[in-house]
Image (cartoon, helix red, strand yellow):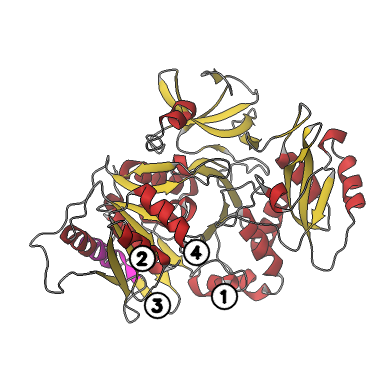
Amino acid sequence: MTDTVLDLLSGHPDGAPVIGGLDRRWLTYGDLRYLAAHTRIILAEQGIGAGDRVAIVLPNGPTMATAFISIATAATTAPLNPAYREEEFRFYLEDLKAKALVVADGDDSPAIGVARSLGARIIRLVDAPHMPAGAFVLIAEGARADKRPLIGGSASGPDDGALVLHTSGTTSRPKIVPLLQRNLAASARHIGGTLALSPADRCLNIMPLFHIHGLIAAVLSSLAAGGSIWCSPGFNALKVFGWLKTAEPTWYTAVPTMHQAILARAARNPDIVAGAKLRFVRSSSASLPPQVMTALEGTFGAPVIESYGMTEATHQMTSNPLPPAPRKPGSVGRAAGPLVRLADQREDRLIAGDGLGEVVISGPNVTPGYEANPDANATAFFEAEGRRWFRTGDQGRFDAEGYLRITGRLKEIINRGGEKVSPLEVDEVLMDHPAVQQVVTFAMPHPKLGEEVAAAAVLRDGMSLSEPDLKAFAAERLADFKVPRRILFLAEIPKGATGKLQRIGLAEKLGLSA
């Protein structure tokens, strides 16, 4: 049984490729195991081991992937968005109590000054461009070049920390989510099993590697299967097709907005699309509009597998299956790792049958609990039927075949004078209009009703549409109280750092009130 990140590296041939990147030869499994062992030595020299937290502020690419993997074999990794400002780094580094910060050699990130002020060690990562993709040397500030411990640092065990991330904090202070070695190993196995990954598979990673989606779904699931990962320098819709040609992946995983951006440029790259060797395409981290799923499958001639995940579950909870089992547009599929049930939103009890309820999970990939936040843990976890369950905050229902359909985040459900409106339902209707390329439905304040339905839409190139016409289109398909009272047409809908559309707070950002 693989219970640690280091276990995920074992058992694969030394010469098998594992990490690739632009204009670099492939790093092998043998190379990566050596890199991880060397990293443990450097960390041990700095007094860092299991239980200590190492913040990582690196750009997307092969070295971010290998740094995460290598450091995670010995300590708890804390990847942070390199685009943060000084005050954001101060909040996260102080909150995490990071013992060290890893940054690229020559980087003048504001994280460095913050880390020094907090007493954290600074460790520089020196990329080696003449070496394989992801190869690096770590140099700690103030360390003597000839000083090395006689023995390497010890590897982390199954119950030691591996990864710590914060929740998005859209409605409250971000919560710390600690994930153990066994959580990461379990989730990597779950995803690999769902997708039938093998050493023959290669993932094109375009997801940011400071987010659970890219770290677990793209990187660790590939390691668990003995496959390989070609790491892009960050998402760029103009370059994706060149990467598809260069990397020759068998799959890629992304959020819906990325898939939509790729589709928008597919017609300009017909030869690359025709030559793509994709076995499947994966989507997660936000609801995939059925229209986008259909377009992706038509473009690449490969099944689109929509999955459902979150940080507290070390990513994957449910997934649509591979063919020949059915994929259901608008559904996030069946349980794919942990047990998945529905619970009463107010009482600590599970709901049987096909009723509407809060999605709850229990399994080896679930975080042991939020750090230093007993109130959040008391709300998020409960005991029922002899198991500990985690409340996801999502509302949904199962069909007769066990496929889950998410009706919305409980905090995002629009309460229009007591009438509850699912933003996802409105999204799907508006996306059916041929002129609409992207849409997000959200709540805006109303003086009498409390909340009213609003939407923001991006139109397809060269197409025009008026607000009254789109409202009329919606009114033919939705009950009157679900029809948006305001629809804004934008060149681009505001997104979070990982490319996800954000409903909460959008009305305020757009200056909307009823």
Q: Give the position of the N terminus as an image quadrant.
A: top left
Q: Which mark is residue 242?
A: 1
Identify residue for label 2: 112
Quick check: marks 4 and 3 in contact, CB under 8 Å? no
Q: Tag 1: residue type? A: Gly
Provide residue 276's location: percent of width, then percent of height: 58, 68
Q: Secondary structure at mark 4?
A: loop
Residues packed near mark 2 inside 10 Å, few (<14), some (14 to 19) or many (20 plus): many
Q: Up-down: is 512 above or below 141? A: above
Identify residue for label 4: 83
User: Earlier along the polypeptide chain: callout 4 or callout 3?
Assistant: 3
Q: Nearer the viewer, residue 102 or 13?
A: 102
User: Earlier along the polypeptide chain: callout 3 or callout 2?
Assistant: 3
Is residue 214 left or right of 164 when viewed as pictured? right
C-alpha separation, residue under disc 3 versus residue under disc 1: 15 Å
**Nearer to us: label 1 or label 2:** 2
